[in-house]
Image (cartoon, rainbow, N blue to C red):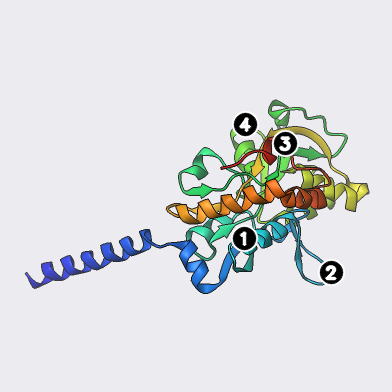
Amino acid sequence: MKFAKLLALCATIVLAAAASGANADALADIAKSGTVRIAVPQDFQPYGSVNANLQLQGLDIDVAQLVAKGLGAKAVLVPVASANRIPYLQTHKVELVISTLGRNAERDKVLDFSQPYAPFNNSLFGAPEIKVSGPVDMANQTVGVARGTFEDIELTKTVPASTVIKRYEDNNTLISAYVSGQIKLIGTGDFVAITLGEKDPAHKPVFKYTIQESRCVIGLNKGEPALQAKVNDILTKAKKSGELNALVKKWLNTPLPDKLANAYE
């Protein structure tokens, strides 16, 4: 009997803790602490990289600072790779993910998102001599991707079974493999490939085909409507003032597309 009561008490404590977590208000916590932890890329130029002074720089870094300012908080930037950015959010190591994150049906089940803040198409690039114009041409080819990216997910779904997909833990390792000739095809973001070609013309990857049209959004844990609404309000104001367009032009050398510039949530 005592054991049964003990089990009931433990169950009550667990449920209370769960309820407390479910009712947590990240926006209130950010206001109280004066800081907001944001996952950002460190190896995905021009969205996020480390400069000669070992400082983070890029579009996502500037957007993170913009959002933190709008929240009235200091940004604590947490460098992540594509594979661990969502786990960092789900384990509450960060409150937001601003790291070339795209949205799809599977991610909608576990995360909430902001309105889009930047363009980001996922495409196949590679050596000029390889003729590829669609998934069917990928038979018996080898392609490199960063693990957990849309390129990884979509290529896995669409290419023939004979295609070899090499998954790298981060973008730097992927790019190094391409530049060194270990792989001749890569799935990555359009602007990432363009930046690589500008930095290293001898290894400029040639566009093959678009894997998926995507957009960058900010990721949040589910059940945080106040924080989601505030982030969307910050982005809407930045779009209307032209501040966000200036950041996109600075890092991507192209203006924010009209469709994104007028997308408010």
Label 3 neighbourhood size at 10 Å, few (<14), some (14-19), many (20+)?
few
Residue 84 in view, yes or no: no
SS under mark 3: helix
Give above or below for 149 relative to 40.
above
**Residue type highlighted by circle 4:** Thr
Work out whether mark 2 precedes mark 1 in sequence or the reverse, and give the earlier one: 2
Work out whether mark 2 precedes mark 4 in sequence or the reverse, and give the earlier one: 2
Q: CA distance from mark 2 to mark 4?
A: 39 Å
Q: Say whether residue 98 is left or right of residue 254.
A: left
Please give the residue where the numbered disc 4 appears in the rendered image.
Answer: 158
**Residue type highlighted by circle 3:** Asp
Please give the residue where the numbered disc 2 appears in the rendered image.
Answer: 52
**Residue type highlighted by circle 2:** Ala
Which mark is nearer the camera, 4 or 3? Answer: 3
Label 2 neighbourhood size at 10 Å, few (<14), some (14-19), many (20+)?
few
Please give the residue where the numbered disc 1 appears in the rendered image.
Answer: 70
**Res 258 label:** 3
Residue 1 in view, yes or no: yes
Seen from the viewer's position, the closer of residues 145 and 77 is 77
Q: CA distance from mark 3 to mark 2?
A: 34 Å
**Residue type highlighted by circle 1:** Gly
Work out whether mark 3 precedes mark 1 in sequence or the reverse, and give the earlier one: 1
- Identified at 74% across, 48% down, the residue is 242
In percent of width and height, residue 57 lies at: 76, 62
Work out whether mark 4 precedes mark 3 in sequence or the reverse, and give the earlier one: 4
Q: CA distance from mark 1 to mark 4?
A: 40 Å
